[in-house]
C-alpha cells in the first residue's frame, strides 16, 4: 500500500503544468529545482499528503528560499465552475451553448477569460483564424521582463498576455480556452506531487527517459500481462523451520525442501530493468512498505511479548529477578537513546530477538517471484525507485526481501557447474571461530548463509509446480519455453510480451493444430518409446522445436489506449501521441498430456435397419 503522506527519502513524481513529469527523491534538508518554475526546500513537502497542487511563491525580502502554497480546488477549476454557473443561470440555452454565444463589448473594454465577479465566460462566434504573433502586442523582450519582475506565481504574466491580445474578441470559446491553457502551462509556477506507482513510472520512462530500457512496454500492456498471467496474491507467508545448524555442521544440516508448501509462485524472465517484477509485486501486494501504524502496532506487540517473558522470568527466582530488572533498565536506556537517534534520523528499531542460524531459509514458500537471468546478477535497477536494492547485502526491511528469488540459467540447467551451489559450506568449531578476527568471522557466516540461500532457490525452482510464467525479454521465446514449461503446474497460464510480432508468431506456430495432429499420429520417430516425463523435456528438432501438446489455447493479441479530442464535429485521436513499438502478448495454458493412445468410449445406441424381403410371385 502507498503511504498517505510523503516520507523522507521516498521517490515521488512531480507533474508540472507543461505536462512534463519529473521523478525525484525527496531527501531532507535539500533543495528541489523545477527549472524555470523555481526552486524550493524539500522539507516543505515532507509529511504532506499526495495529490496536492502546490504553487511556488516569490521569495520574501528577508528569506533566501521560496515558500509553497496549497492551491485549493476552487481555484484550480475556476473556469469549469464559472461555466457551470453560467449554464445554470441560463438553462434554456442548454449545454454547449456558450460555444456560439457572444458578449457584447464596448470600445476599449478589457477582458479576461473568466470574470471573477459576474462569472461570465467570454465567448466569440467567428471562425476566423488568428495569427497569434501578429495580434499579440507584447514583444518577447517585454514578456521576458514581465517574467523576471512578475509576482503572484506567474498569474500576472498570463493576465497581461490576455489583456494585450488585439484579437481576443474574435476567438471562439474553445480557441480562447486553448489559448489561456497554453499560456498557463508556460508561465504558471505550479506542480502536483504524485506517488510512484507502476503506471506513473512506466509513462515517465516512455515519454521522458529511454523507452528501449523497458522494451517499449506500456501500462496497458503490463496490465494485460498481469491479467493473462493470473498474477495475484498467492496466500499467507509460510516459512521453513530453522534447522538450528551449528558452525561445525555442513550441508547435512540444511532445511529439507517441502514441496507440499510451495504454492502461489510465479516464474519471471525480465529484461525491463525490473519494471515487470515491480508490476507483478504490486499485484501480489509485496511492492510497497506497510504504513507506520502497522509497524508501530507490530513493535508494540513485540514489546508486550518481551515484557510478559520478563515477568515470567522474574517469578522463577529472586536472583533471576534482580538480573532481569537490571537488563530492563539497560534496555530502557538503549530504547531512550534509540528514540533520540530516530528523532534525528528515522530508522527502524533494532530487533532484539535471537539471531537465526546460518542455514535458516529467509524466503517465504508462497506468494513469491522467481526471476531467471543470464548474467551473474539480475538487472533489477528500477526497483530502487521503490526503495529496494537487490545488490545490497544488508538491506533494510522490505516486503520484497522474503518474496523475490533470483537465479541464473546456469544454476537452473547445470547447477553442478556453479561454484556457489556445488562448493560445500565452510565449517569451524566454536574454539577456532573465537580466535578469528571479527571480519573473518563475518565472512564465514556470510558465505554459509549465501550457500543456504542459493541451495534453497535452485532446489525449489527445479522442483517446479509454478503457478504461472511471465516474460518480457529479448531472448528467443522458444528457448525460454523449452526449459520453463516443464516447471509449470497443470493449467498454469503463460504470458510473453515482445515488442515485435515475428518471434511470437514463430512461437505460436510451434503449438498449431497441424503440429499437434502430426505429433499425436504416432509417426514421429524421435518420440517413439519415450515416457511422458521425457516428452515434457523434449530437446526439440527442426520439425518440432517444442512439444506441441504442452500448451493449449494459444493466441497473440495487442492493445493500445489512445487519447481523444472530443468536440462537436471534431472528435478524433490526438495525432501527437508517442510512436514506438505497439507490443504483442502471447498467451496459453499449460497442459498435462495423457499417456497412451486416446480413444472415445461410451454407450452407443445401435440403429436397427429393416431389410425388405422379396417374395416370389405365385405361379
Image (cartoon, rainbow, N blue to C red):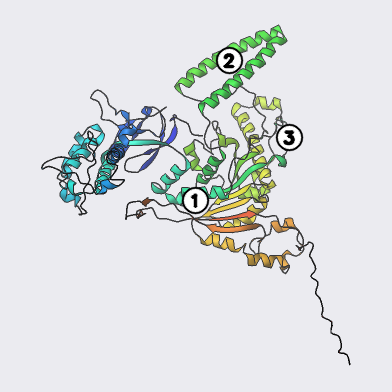
The reply, left or right, for residue 104 in relation to residue 269 is: left
Q: Relative to 272, is 193 above or below? A: above
Residue 418 x %, y % = 64, 46
* Residue most extreme to the bottom: 619
Pointer 1 local density, CA inside 10 Å: few below 14, some 14–19, many at least 20: many
Determine the CA span between mark 2 and mark 1: 52 Å
Relative side of 291 to 576, left or right: right
Residue 271 visible in rendering: no
Q: State the residue position of label 1.
A: 221
Mark 2 vs 1, N-terminal side: 1
Q: Which sits earlier in the primary sequence, circle 3 or circle 2?
A: 3
Instruction: Read off the residue under disc 2.
Output: 331
Counting from the top left corner in percent of width and height, residue 475 is at 55, 55
Dot 3 alpha-carbon crowd within 10 angstroms: few under 14, some 14 to 19, many 20 or more:
some
Q: Nearer the viewer, mark 2 or mark 1?
A: 1
Q: Nearer the viewer, residue 502 or 563?
A: 563
Q: Residue at coordinates 20% horizontally, 34% vertically from top-left?
A: 150
Amino acid at each position: 500500500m502507498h503511504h498517505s503522506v510523503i516520507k523522507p527519502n521516498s521517490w515521488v513524481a512531480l507533474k508540472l503544468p507543461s505536462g512534463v513529469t519529473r521523478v525525484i527523491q525527496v531527501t531532507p534538508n535539500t533543495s528541489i529545482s523545477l527549472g524555470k518554475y523555481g526552486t524550493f526546500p524539500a522539507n516543505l513537502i515532507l509529511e504532506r499528503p499526495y495529490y496536492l497542487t502546490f504553487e511556488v511563491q516569490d521569495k520574501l525580502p528577508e528569506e533566501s528560499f521560496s515558500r509553497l502554497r496549497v492551491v485549493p480546488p476552487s481555484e484550480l477549476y475556476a473556469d469549469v465552475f464559472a461555466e457551470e454557473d453560467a449554464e445554470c443561470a441560463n438553462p434554456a440555452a442548454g449545454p454547449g451553448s456558450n460555444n456560439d454565444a457572444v458578449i457584447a463589448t464596448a470600445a476599449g473594454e478589457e477582458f479576461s477569460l473568466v470574470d471573477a465577479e459576474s462569472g461570465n465566460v467570454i465567448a466569440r462566434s467567428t471562425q476566423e483564424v488568428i495569427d497569434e504573433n501578429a495580434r499579440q502586442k507584447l514583444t518577447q523582450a517585454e514578456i521576458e521582463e514581465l517574467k523576471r519582475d512578475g509576482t503572484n506565481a506567474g498569474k500576472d504574466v498570463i493576465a497581461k498576455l490576455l489583456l494585450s491580445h488585439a484579437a481576443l474578441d474574435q476567438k471562439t470559446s474553445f480557441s480562447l480556452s486553448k489559448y489561456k491553457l497554453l499560456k498557463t502551462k508556460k508561465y504558471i509556477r505550479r506542480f502536483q506531487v504524485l506517488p510512484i506507482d507502476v503506471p506513473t513510472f512506466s509513462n515517465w520512462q516512455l515519454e521522458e527517459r529511454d523507452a528501449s530500457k523497458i522494451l517499449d512496454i506500456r501500462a496497458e500492456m503490463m496490465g494485460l500481462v498481469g491479467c493473462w498471467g493470473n498474477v495475484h496474491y498467492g496466500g499467507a507467508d509460510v516459512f521453513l523451520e530453522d534447522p538450528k545448524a551449528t558452525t561445525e555442521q555442513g550441508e547435512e544440516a540444511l532445511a529439507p525442501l517441502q514441496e507440499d508448501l510451495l504454492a502461489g509462485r510465479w516464474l519471471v524472465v525480465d529484461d525491463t530493468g525490473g519494471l515487470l517484477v515491480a508490476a507483478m509485486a504490486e499485484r501480489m501486494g509485496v511492492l510497497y512498505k506497510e504504513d507506520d501504524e502497522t509497524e508501530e502496532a507490530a513493535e508494540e506487540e513485540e514489546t508486550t511479548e518481551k515484557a510478559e517473558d520478563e515477568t515470567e522470568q522474574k517469578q522463577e527466582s529472586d536472583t533471576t529477578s534482580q538480573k532481569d530488572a537490571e537488563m530492563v533498565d539497560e534496555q530502557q536506556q538503549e530504547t531512550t537513546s534509540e528514540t533520540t537517534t530516530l528523532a534525528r534520523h528515522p530508522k527502524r528499531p533494532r530487533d532484539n530477538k535471537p539471531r537465526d542460524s546460518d542455514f535458516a531459509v529467509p524466503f517465504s514458500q508462497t506468494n513469491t517471484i522467481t526471476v531467471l537471468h543470464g548474467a551473474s546478477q539480475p538487472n533489477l535497477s528500477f526497483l530502487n525507485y521503490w526503495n529496494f536494492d537487490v545488490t545490497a547485502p544488508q538491506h533494510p526491511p522490505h516486503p520484497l526481501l522474503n518474496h523475490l528469488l533470483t537465479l541464473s540459467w546456469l544454476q537452473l540447467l547445470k547447477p553442478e557447474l556453479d561454484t556457489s551451489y556445488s562448493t560445500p559450506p565452510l565449517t569451524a568449531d566454536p574454539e577456532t571461530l573465537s580466535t578469528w578476527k571479527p571480519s573473518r568471522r563475518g565472512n564465514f557466516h556470510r558465505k554459509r548463509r549465501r550457500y543456504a540461500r542459493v541451495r534453497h532457490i535452485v532446489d525449489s525452482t527445479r522442483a517446479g509446480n509454478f503457478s504461472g510464467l511471465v516474460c518480457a525479454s529479448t531472448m528467443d521465446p522458444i528457448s525460454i519455453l523449452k526449459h520453463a514449461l516443464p516447471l509449470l503446474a497443470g493449467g498454469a497460464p503463460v504470458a510473453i510480451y515482445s515488442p515485435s510480432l515475428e518471434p511470437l508468431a514463430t512461437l505460436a506456430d510451434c503449438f498449431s493444430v497441424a503440429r499437434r495432429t502430426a505429433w499425436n499420429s504416432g509417426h514421429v520417430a524421435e518420440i517413439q518409446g519415450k515416457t511422458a516425463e521425457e516428452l515434457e523435456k523434449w530437446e526439440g528438432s527442426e520439425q518440432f522445436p517444442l512439444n506441441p501438446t504442452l500448451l493449449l489455447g494459444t493466441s497473440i493479441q495487442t492493445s493500445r489506449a489512445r487519447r481523444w479530442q472530443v468536440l462537436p464535429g471534431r472528435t478524433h485521436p490526438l495525432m501527437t501521441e508517442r510512436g514506438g513499438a505497439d507490443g504483442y502478448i502471447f498467451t496459453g495454458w499449460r497442459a498435462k498430456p495423457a499417456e497412451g493412445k486416446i480413444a472415445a468410449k461410451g454407450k452407443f445406441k445401435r440403429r436397427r435397419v429393416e431389410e425388405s424381403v422379396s417374395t416370389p410371385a405365385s405361379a
